[in-house]
Every structure is written in C-alpha cells, then in structure tokens.
C-alpha cells in the first residue's frame, strides 16, 4: 500500500543484488513512460527480505496533483512493480513536489 511519509525517514538498509535493482528501475521507467504526467522516480533502494524484495523510492509529481490523485498513481505504480518483478513484496513510495531538495 503506498503512503506518504515525512522527509528524512530512512529507507531500505540491506541492499539486494545489482541485477534486482536494475530490474526494479526498468519497471519504474516503463510505468513512467506510460503515464500522461510522468512521475520522476529517484533514490530507488531495494533490499532482500527472505526470498522477497522490499523497494523504497522517491517520486516527484506535479505540484498541482491532488493527494488523492498522487495516492492512486503510486498505488498503480506499486501494482505495476509487483507484476513486473514478481519477487517484490513491499513497496514504499515517498511522494515529493518538484521543488523538494
């Protein structure tokens, strides 16, 4: 389930193999290309949790997007990631406005 957390929260701590990171990044890029207002995904972190992957990332969205629309977009983004990379269990997406540093 996507949610919005305060800035400064720690992300994933145990890194997965680089191949898993690349697969997750490709899935995010494909999703973004399919959206009318493409989200800009960055700071992607992937960790192993048993046989599954947990993914954390930041997603820059248009400042005019409502919280409801941002939540729906990130929900679909998480569903896409789980379908594209079958081992993904947990997805945390930190939504940011364009001017966030």
Image (spheres, grey):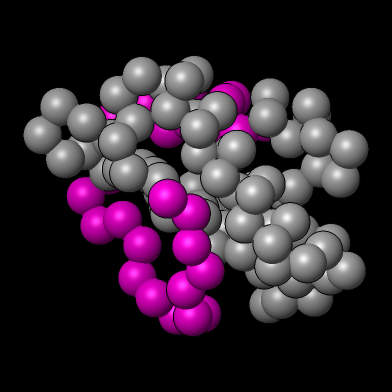
Q: Is residue 44 left or right of residue 91?
A: right
Residue 74 in picture, x, y percent from top left: 60, 48
Quarter of the view holding residue 21: top left
Whether residue 71 is visible = yes
Q: Is residue 85 above or below residue 1?
A: above
Residue under the point 81% across and 42% down: 38
Residue 80 in picture, x, y percent from top left: 55, 28
| Magenta residue check for 28 | yes
The one nearer the camera, 73 or 43, is 73
| Magenta residue check for 80 | no
Tell me the magenta residue range. Answer: 1-29
Residue sitting at the far front: 68
Q: Quadrant of the C terminus?
A: bottom right
Residue under the point 69% across and 67% down: 67
Residue 46 in picture, x, y percent from top left: 36, 42
Whether residue 59 is visible = no
Residue 36 in picture, x, y percent from top left: 89, 38
Q: Is residue 8 left or right of residue 32?
A: left
Quarter of the view holding residue 48: top left
Residue under the point 49% across and 19% down: 84
Q: Is residue 87 left or right of residue 98?
A: left
């Amino acid at each position: 389930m996507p949610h919005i957390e305060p800035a400064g929260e720690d992300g994933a701590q145990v890194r997965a193999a680089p191949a898993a990171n690349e697969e997750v990044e490709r899935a995010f890029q494909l999703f973004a290309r399919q959206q009318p207002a493409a989200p800009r995904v960055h700071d992607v972190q992937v960790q192993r949790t048993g046989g599954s992957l947990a993914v954390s990332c930041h997603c820059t969205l248009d400042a005019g997007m409502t919280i409801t629309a941002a939540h729906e977009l990130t929900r679909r983004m998480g569903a896409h990631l789980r379908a594209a990379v079958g081992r993904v269990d947990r997805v945390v997406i930190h939504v940011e406005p364009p001017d966030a540093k």
